[in-house]
Image (cartoon, grey):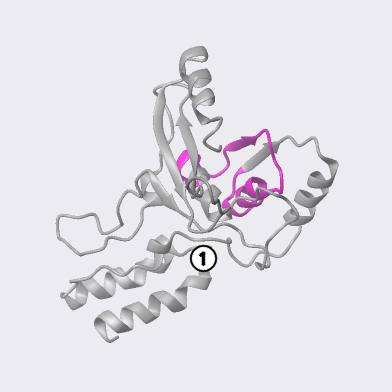
Amino acid sequence: MGVRFISYLYEILDDELNCPFNSWITWHYTQGMGRKRGFSPRHDDILMFNMSDQFTFNLDAVRVPQKYYRSRNNMRGANPGDVWEFSHVHYCQKNRQSHPTQKPEALIERMVLASSDEGDLVLDPFVGSGTTPRVCQQLGRRFLGFEINPDYVALAQERLGAEFSGFDGVDPRMARVPKDMRDPELRRAYLEKHPEWFLKNHEGCLDLFEKRVLELYGE
């Protein structure tokens, strides 16, 4: 939600519905509406509340690659934190739909992976361009959604029937290669796992990943 209304939603969830607060996430993007009087907006906010103290959080499913290798670190990756960088779905992109506030699939992918397991039911009361059902379809989640605009309903249905070639958008850290992996055996084991851990459904980043491996380790 944009900054004008996010605080009202927080009050409703916290004070009126008594949902346990979890995280206040900032979605940062590098391009957006320009302003001449005031600062141009470059973020939206995402509130994470839970229904109770018992909830799903799949950290391993949403980790990002470490910047440096340290033996004490979890080489499966780091917690992505509460500031997320995903580019908008630009009008020149193949997956761009006729909807004013289309969200990047990778943004929704992180939410769905973190908060649900395969076979779980995901609810979206504002389906819009169909990003959430498309992500759920590819991640093996069941989906229930609402949308009052019949044009958007048709758009979402068409999108669900389209061929899948990877999610649009990606956290730029996902192709990052940890530095200082001097042990050849450890490095080989890690590099073989990196695409499965971090680039599944983002095959377009494999070339960049391989380029960075070559630059760092010459292999």
Task: Write the start and end of the magenta stretch as one range.
Answer: 113-141
**Element assignment for label 1:** loop
The quarter of the picture where residue 160 lies is bottom right
Query: Residue at point 16% right, 61% down?
Result: 70
Asked whether the viewer can see residue 61, the reply is: no
153 to 199, vertically: above or below: above
Percent position of residue 51, x then y = 48, 23
- Residue nearest the viewer, comparing 39 with 106: 39
Magenta-drawn stretch contains 105: no
Q: Residues within 10 Å of mark 1 (few under 14, many from 20)?
A: some
Magenta-drawn stretch contains 119: yes
Which residue is under mark 1?
A: 202
Asked whether the viewer can see residue 21, the reply is: yes
Query: Residue at point 53% right, 25% down?
Result: 9
184 to 93, vertically: above or below: below
Percent position of residue 205, x then y = 47, 71
Q: Is residue 41 left or right of residue 184?
A: right
